[in-house]
Amino acid sequence: MNRFLPFLSLIPFAGANLDCFAQKPTNQPNVVFIYADDIGYGDISCNGSKTIKTPNIDKLAAQGVRFTNMHSAAATCTPSRYALLTGEYAWRREGTGIAAGNAGSIIRPERYTLADVFKNAGYQTGVVGKWHLGLGDQTGTQDWNGHITPGPSDIGFNYSFILAATGDRVPCVYVENERIFNLDPKDPIFVDYEKNFDGEPTGKLNPELLKMHPSHGHDMSIVNGISRIGFMKGGKSALWKDEEMADVITSKAVEYIEKNKNKPFFLYFATQDAHVPRVPNPRFVGSSGMGPRGDAIIEFDWSVGEVIRTLKKLGLEKNTIVVLSSDNGPVVDDGYKDQAVELLGNHRPAGDFRGGKYSSFEGGTRVPGILSWPGTVKAGVSEQLLCQVDMVATFAEVLKVKLPAGSAPDSENCMNAWLNKGGKGREYLVLQNVNNNLSIESENWKFIAPGKGSAYSALTNTEFGNLNQDQLYDLSKDIGEKVNVAAHHPEVVEKLRTKLEQIKIAK
Ligand code: NG6
Ligand code: CA
């Protein structure tokens, strides 16, 4: 029998085999995940913003599925990103709170990640933009002038071009494949989160050197006329210019797509817009009429447009899934005097939701959510309860990758909801605010467990949602979480409290 096989394969299947080479099999779509920073549900026009216009995002939503109940797993960046990449709720792990710029790698090399799912399916995997998950082995011990390891390559990414942490934290440099980009070895870089370096100016002592002033915090080392969190010196040729950041990372994302156009690829493109400091490129300044925050959202929309334009140009549009979301809800004053408060006008960054970044209320985690896969995913709007923590299990299902035992413990396969095939989203979802207080949602009920921490921050003008008593909201009638109905529905409170306790001890 065997001796006929070579002959057989040449004749009847020859055409099919050639097709296979000409086109990637459709079970290997490219995936681009665009992750905004601090952009709220109500900041984009397809979600109802009348003030800020986001035509590129709107187009993506119109050709795909727009989710109205998509959540980041937490109301701040690091735990949301941790959950996204590992499929594990961050509150299960110590050390997953908002990371300092010199934090060690929070996701350890042995961890199975979203990038590994793609790698196991034979994909190229790249990350471009904001990282904020720590680098190197331990806090403060990185070799910033050498190989900063472990890093993204140890958790599944075979290309990385990232900000070490965030725009407002030192070191203010890009890191490409775990080495500082454009670093002159004759001008090494030094980083410290406890004390300043002798003779180096700070925002606190030298406000005359600043082009943007802090409103709270952010008064340490000055880079590009903006004072940051943490101290650094040296590395002059490597220092970023905030005005160019969107251009730099968008061009790296575009380059990555172009380079990998003939292979299946996964690109995690995490923009810095609209996190502080908000310093959009001069060509966007004034475009929103709302100051730097609005302009940064328009700049983000431009980045989205560049990615889509590139996919179209390369003929990859139909074979690429684009997912867009944000790492937490919006905040207006997050530490710089950038006129975001004064120029807000009628704009409502969180839409109809209460609270925002840092908060247990919906504004903290209910974020923009869009998935587009032209020709495969039917356009529409989905109200299913979804969370980014499910990307690991969901994309493992899309790609038919088997997850190793024990990996991604909180990630649920919601493929038929994400691909708008009529599938259900989550039955239960646990969410985390800035104080690590937990809430649980199910079937339009939202239970916020009693927790410590202040109810309100005057600095950021945010309601955190902390209270030392039960809170229950009926989201089917009260999307703005105005009326605490815990006393009227003790059975729902007990059911959700019990479920939350079970989820906490499980895994
Ligand atoms: C806060 C910062 C805020 C922002 C946030 C993290 C101060 C006063 N505030 O501590 O500006 O950086 O951390 O944001 O320092 S996140 O989106 O990366 O989680
Ligand atoms: Ca964020």
Image: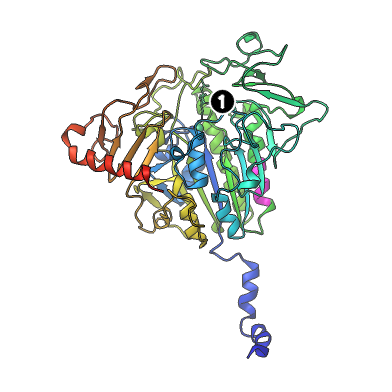
Circle 1 crowding by C-alpha within 10 Å: few under 14, some 14–19, many from 20: many
Amino acid, disc 1: Arg
In the displayed structure, 20 sits above or below 7; it is above
* Point 49% across, 59% down: residue: 398
First to last magenta residue range: 251-258
On screen, 381 above or below 1? above
* Disc 1, SS: loop
Q: Which residue is mark 1?
A: 278
- In percent of width and height, residue 481 lies at 28, 32
- Queried whether the magenta region covers residue 382, the answer comes back as no
Nearer to the camera, 29 or 362: 362
Question: Residue pushed farthest right?
Answer: 186
**Is residue 316 visible from the viewing direction of this image?**
no
Q: Taking 184 as reference, is 21 above or below it?
A: below
Please provide percent x and percent y for residue 335. 51, 19
Q: Residue furthest front?
A: 505
Which scheme is used to colour this image of the protein?
rainbow
Q: Quadrant of residue 358?
A: top left
Spot occupied by residue 220 in the image (x, y as percentages of width and height):
61, 16
Residue at figure coordinates x 29%, y 25% from the top left = 468
Residue at (27% x, 42% y) in the render: 498
The overriding secondary structure of the stretch rendered in magenta is: helix
Comparing 2 with 16, the one in front is 2
Q: Is residue 290 visible?
A: yes
Q: Which residue is painted at 57% across and 66% down in the image?
A: 25
Left or right: where 448 falls relative to 60:
left
**Residue 2 percent across, percent down from the top left:** 65, 88
Nearest to the observer: residue 239 or residue 501: 501
All told, the count of numbered labels is 1
Left or right: 449 as drawn, with respect to 143: left
